[in-house]
Amino acid sequence: MSYSFSSHRTIRIALDAGDQLGEGPHWNSPAGELTRVDITGRRVHAWRPDTGATWSLTVEGEVGAAIPRAGGGLVLAVDHDLILRDADGTQRVVATAEPDIADNRFNDCRADARGRLWAGTMSRSRVPGTAALYRLEPDGELMPALDRITISNGLGWSPAGDRMYFIDSPTQRIDVCDFDAATGTISDRRPLATVDPADGLPDGLTVDREGGVWVCLFGGAAIRRYGAEGSLDADVRLPLTNPTCPAFGGPDLATLFVTTARHRLTPARLAAEPRAGALLAFEPGVRGLPGQAFGG
């Protein structure tokens, strides 16, 4: 199916959030709310577009992701730990990764359609090959899936569930793997598309229901859509320099929300972009896939 993005679509500030390092948007359909994290701000936020209601919680560490759990609560990726947080605020660590590498922490996480959590780590100082991508089973077993990673970022699956997309940002690539949904195994990792460093750093991603892969370009003030075979279908210019991660949301999954960051902007750039760290939104003309809960 062909896709064409109209330049007349309006990119708007959905929420003037002021996040230092906004990341990990996730549309929770049952609750009708968008959750996100502010990694260095050590906060988890949620927002209901229909009412404007918000809630937040503070965590003790840098929080890479907050994914809803089946039955309520969240799974939080905080520093080296994956933490199960119940609806009443009770918390317990379910898995720990790379505790011997102080410079590393968990980063992007996503749940697949079988309720497994895919959780990547990253090196804060970009030490090559010291991080990894892990798979957390609903029963709490943490298994390595990919090693020799530097900065784990975007994760997503094709509409048919037979492909998984993954970004290790310093490679400047979006990779695709064959995915076995029954076993949760990945194979034949290969490049889907390459991003010129001058255009920005590939960061978070999401997949639409036609199979298009939307990728934020950190530092590049843009989000791109790549076709399932790697064609560049759209290069959407954004009003803020550091978009980090996209997620489809709204009652019909027709709105694309994009988190952004003030992180790494110079004082001069911050003065020019006082709304850096806001949550952006626009209607790209294609709908997304529903977000999945851990354990569901």
Image (cartoon, grey):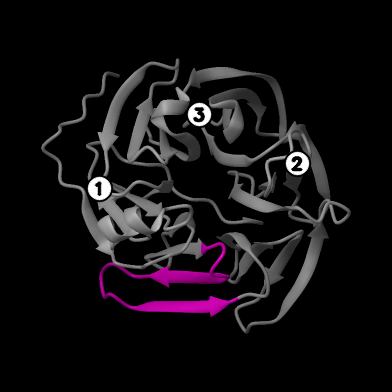
Is residue 194 part of the magenta span, yes or no? Answer: no
How many numbered dots are placed on residues in this image? 3
Q: Is residue 63 visible?
A: yes
- Tell me the tag on residue 160: 3
Query: What residue is at 22 percent from the left and 45 percent from the top?
Result: 283
Question: Amino acid under label 1?
Answer: Pro
The residue that mark 2 highlights is 131
Location of residue 32 with respect to 109 vertically, above or below = below
Instruction: Give the Cα separation between the discs numbered 3 and 1.
Output: 33 Å
**Residue indicated by mark 1:** 239
Q: Secondary structure at mark 3?
A: loop
Describe the element under mark 1 as helix, strand or loop: loop
Answer above or below: position of 244 versus 229: below
x and y, in percent, of residue 216 in the image: 41, 39
Instruction: Confirm whether the magenta stretch covers residue 56.
Output: yes
Q: Where does the C terminus fall, quadrant-wise? A: bottom right
Query: Which of the two discs, 3 and 2, sits closer to the camera?
Result: 2
Q: Which residues are magenta?
A: 38-58
